[in-house]
Image (tube, rainbow, N blue to C red):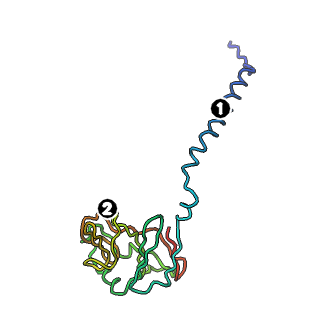
Amino acid sequence: MADIHAVEPTRRDFLYVATGSLAAVGAAFTVWPLIDQMNPDASVLALASIEVDISNIPVGQETTFKWRGKPVFVRHRTEAEIAAAESVDVATLPDPQTDAERLVAGPNGEVDKQWLVVIGICTHLGCVPLAYRGEYDGYFCPCHGSVYDTSGRIRKGPAPTNLEVPPYAFISDTRIKIG
């Protein structure tokens, strides 16, 4: 028959647990400032999203806004630009995307074809393309010759992908929120 005796904790056991707990709390207080400094500061958080008034952009014109240090092109497209963007055979594009895939729903819930919002940085080497230039009257990057259409899709040149569409949503008929 085995004799089982419960071992009573001693003062030494208490000191081990108390010392270990105090060391863990001290380590947490030491490491926290190092982790906390990796969080973005207030100026970065303020630029995380911007609201843009689009009521003063006439049809056929474009305005550039700065978001997260990048140029964002907001283009009020004409019916001809929309028709040209929709008539493209997507299978012939280097980065196939339909025009509708590059747009978001407007305030009425339907895809708003007249507004194109793209980040104005060439996907080849990061240059800023020129608007209303090139063979397709979209964007042209003069540095290496990338040509984009009126939907910001790559059509010719060394750029591997379309101009990036930032996350955006319509707040009202005259305002959009980017970011």
Q: Earlier in the sequence, mark 1 or mark 2?
A: 1
Q: Quadrant of the N terminus?
A: top right
Is 152 situated left or right of 110 in this image? left
In the image, is residue 86 above or below residue 37? Answer: below
| Element at label 2 | loop
Q: Which residue is mark 1?
A: 23
User: Counting other residues with Cα less than 10 Å from the Cα at mark 1, is it few (<14), some (14-19), or many (20 or more)?
Assistant: few
Q: Nearer the viewer, residue 55 or 142?
A: 142
Pinpoint residue 156: horizontal percent, then vertical percent: 24, 70
| Element at label 1 | helix
Residue at 72% in and 24% down: 15
Identify which amino acid the numbered label 1 is placed on: Ala
Q: Nearer the viewer, residue 67 or 110?
A: 67
- Residue 154 placement: quadrant: bottom left
Q: CA distance from mark 1 to mark 2?
A: 50 Å
Pinpoint residue 137: horizontal percent, then vertical percent: 29, 80
- Say which mark, if any, is on residue 125: 2
Pinpoint residue 85: horizontal percent, then vertical percent: 32, 79
Pinpoint residue 58: horizontal percent, then vertical percent: 44, 86
Label pair 1/2, CB-CB below 8 angstroms:
no
Q: Which of the two discs, 1 and 2, sits closer to the camera?
A: 2
In the image, is residue 46 above or below residue 115? Answer: above
